[in-house]
Image (cartoon, rainbow, N blue to C red):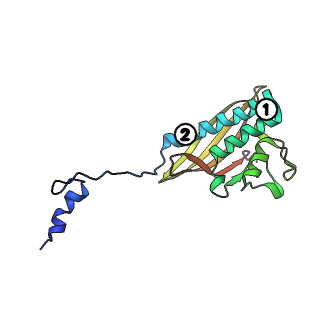
Amino acid sequence: MRSRFLQAAPALVLGLSLQGQAAPTVQVLNGNITQAEVVAAQKGWCQALLKISAAYASGGFSQAKATAEAVIDQAYAYQFGPVAFKPTLASGAHTFRATRAGALAYFVGGNPDFPGDKGFAIKPWRSCEVTNQVIQLNGSYANTMGNVSFKDVAGKTTTVDKTWAFMKEPDGSIRIVLHHSSLPFEG
């Protein structure tokens, strides 16, 4: 025999008013990341890299550094903890950049704690294009793997293998939590 509660449960689930009461206000929290959001974040990363390069060309190191700081704060999740960042041209004791300072050094150089960094983002880049081979969406996380091609002012193209993991934050922003980049194997 069903209880009265079980008989009334469908009305509660559907948010219907009972006994003349107004329906409750419903907030839907959906942290699912979409393919469109991931692709937009990748395009934003490319635009940001070009913005750092242009800032360096027009205003020198200090302008490039300020631009890179803003980019890192917006694109990466360092404010929440370490980010798994392995830049393309990093090696030795400074291969991995779990901190914001390490990422900033890679993008613009100028940090004596990272003496090998020359500033990847301050090179004279003119275009940046992402080509995805795999996109995996899993709730608030997404993984991508593919290539990013950069073209410099002389028209020379450099293509790297790139793996990213993105997280959709509760405020809806998409941030990089893993970034691995390497030059293609030439063997």
Q: Residue pushed farthest left? A: 1
Q: Residue pushed farthest bottom? A: 1
Q: Residue pushed farthest front? A: 21
What mark, if any, has residue 56 been given in the picture? 1
Q: Quadrant of residue 15?
A: bottom left
**Label 1 crowd (10 A; few <14 / some 14-19 / many >=20):** many
Label 1 residue SS: helix
Q: Nearer the viewer, mark 1 or mark 2?
A: 1
Q: Position of residue 161 (x, y in %)?
A: 68, 45
Q: Looking at the rendering, in which quadrant would you find the N terminus?
A: bottom left
184 part of magenta stretch:
yes
Q: Which residue is mark 2?
A: 39
Q: Is residue 100 left or right of residue 31?
A: right
Segment colored magenta: 183-187
Q: Position of residue 45 (x, y in %)?
A: 64, 39
Residue drawn at (54%, 43%) of the image: 38
Mark 2 residue type: Val
Residue situated in front as seen by the camera: 89 or 104: 104
